[in-house]
């Protein structure tokens, strides 16, 4: 008899809320749709300014920030620091399509921060998100 294995659902979904920031519209749509189909609540922004505007809304709380390393109006690390002042302890997952040498110039590497290389697939995204949320301290 053939057994069908049910797909794993995200650990803290559907209650987990994610702020997603990427200036590439196609990437933003893919990541957002993948996360929403897995049960996450996603707020999306194309720039650091848009992400900070979302963060200023006192009714918004997020469990995870996913941001591109390089945005048109800020580095992802600068945005993450601003957002962590708003939401202390919120985990941050960085995404990048840049080569390792470019990342090192920004002070980042996969050894120092959670980094998802682009392009990525939905399963890798969901596995990484789940691991970060499972490891995050309760807020």
Image (spheres, grey):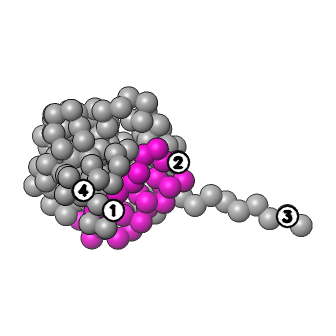
Lower sequence index among marks 3 and 4: 3
Q: Quadrant of residue 93?
A: bottom left
Relative horizontal placement of residue 11, taking residue 70 as reference (left or right)? right
For label 3, the residue is 2
Q: What element carries label 1?
A: loop
Lower sequence index among marks 1 and 2: 1
**What residue do we see at 30% from left, 33% from top?**
23
Q: Disc 1 and disc 4: Cα gap in Å? A: 10 Å
Q: In which quarter of the image is the C terminus?
A: bottom left
Badge nearest the viewer, 2 or 3: 2
Q: Which region is colored magenta? A: 113-139
Lower sequence index among marks 2 and 3: 3
- Examine the rendered structure and indicate whether residue 114 appears above or below residue 119: below
Lower sequence index among marks 1 and 3: 3
Residue 47: horizontal and vertical position, in percent? 22, 33
- Examine the rendered structure and indicate whether residue 36 appears above or below residue 49: below
For label 2, the residue is 121
Q: In which quarter of the image is residue 55?
A: top left
Residue 53: horizontal and vertical position, in percent? 15, 35
**What residue do we see at 29% from left, 53% from top?**
101
> Which disc, if any, is residue 104?
4
Q: What element carries label 4?
A: helix
| Residue at the front extreme of this rendering | 101
For label 1, the residue is 110
Lower sequence index among marks 1 and 4: 4
């Amino acid at each position: 008899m053939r057994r069908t294995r049910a797909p794993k659902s995200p650990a803290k979904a559907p209650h987990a809320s994610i702020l997603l920031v990427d200036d590439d519209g196609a990437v933003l749509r893919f990541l957002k749709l993948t996360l929403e189909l897995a049960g996450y609540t996603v707020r999306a922004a194309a720039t650091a300014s848009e992400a900070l505007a979302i963060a200023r809304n006192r009714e918004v709380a997020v469990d995870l920030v996913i941001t591109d390393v390089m945005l048109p109006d800020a580095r992802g690390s600068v945005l993450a620091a601003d957002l962590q002042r708003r939401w202390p302890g919120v985990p941050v997952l960085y995404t990048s399509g840049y080569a390792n040498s470019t990342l090192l110039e920004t002070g980042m590497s996969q050894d120092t921060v959670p980094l998802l290389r682009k392009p990525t697939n939905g399963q890798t995204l969901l596995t990484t998100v789940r691991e970060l949320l499972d490891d995050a301290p309760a807020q």
